[in-house]
Image (cartoon, rainbow, N blue to C red):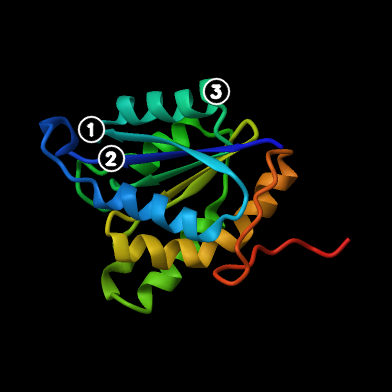
Amino acid sequence: MMIAKIGIITTSDRASAGVYEDLSGKAIIDTLNLYLKSHWEPVYRCISDDRKTIEDNLIDLIDNEKCCLVVTTGGTGPAQRDVTPEATEAVCDRMMPGFGELMRSVSLQYVPTAILSRQTAGLRGSSLIVNLPGKPKSIKECLDAVFPAIPYCIDIMEGPYLETNEEIIKAFRPKK
């Protein structure tokens, strides 16, 4: 049985300060632990939010660590330092705009400022990268919305089979 490797990147201008508790990265890991029944291994990074560092880590997680999925948190707002979407687009072969559209739509149910978010998703080789917002509550809301499509996306790219805990979240896979 293949163990899925999932990259988790938190981008933060406080990451390089050394005294930073990453609640967002923990929220992603906790949520994925709830969602997934299949065995998976997190490959976690908390990095500074400069574009080159983000690009280098995305490339490393996919090309070298062989992660089938990389989930980022942070750096998706309108501030000058928010460059995660640009870094994602730079390393992707193809973009998947539906992910960002759905996440913004869901977030708008909670806060009107969701339109300021620039989350996106894309494909690099046979891996999926998804940018999430930076707040743990928003991370869960967005993952609840998009995760049902992620296992099938990974299937199509011939990645590891991600089995979900259907009592928590049901992955959509078309009937054959």
Q: Position of residue 153 (x, y in %)?
A: 66, 50
In whole angstroms, how far apart are the C-alphas of marks 3 and 2?
Answer: 20 Å
Q: Residue at x 53, y 61 (%)?
A: 146
Q: As displayed, is residue 41 above or below residue 111?
A: above
Residue linked to disc 1: 48
In whole angstroms, how far apart are the C-alphas of marks 3 and 1?
Answer: 20 Å
Mark number for residue 63? 3
Residue type pointed to by label 3:
Asp
- Quarter of the picture containing the C terminus is bottom right
Q: Nearer the N terminus, badge 3 or badge 2?
A: 2
The number of numbered badges drawn on the structure is 3
Mark number for residue 11? 2
Q: Residue at x 53, y 34 (%)?
A: 92
* Residue 40 in which image quadrant: top right
Residue type pointed to by label 2:
Thr
In the image, farthest residue toward the bottom: 109
In whole angstroms, how far apart are the C-alphas of marks 1 and 2?
Answer: 5 Å
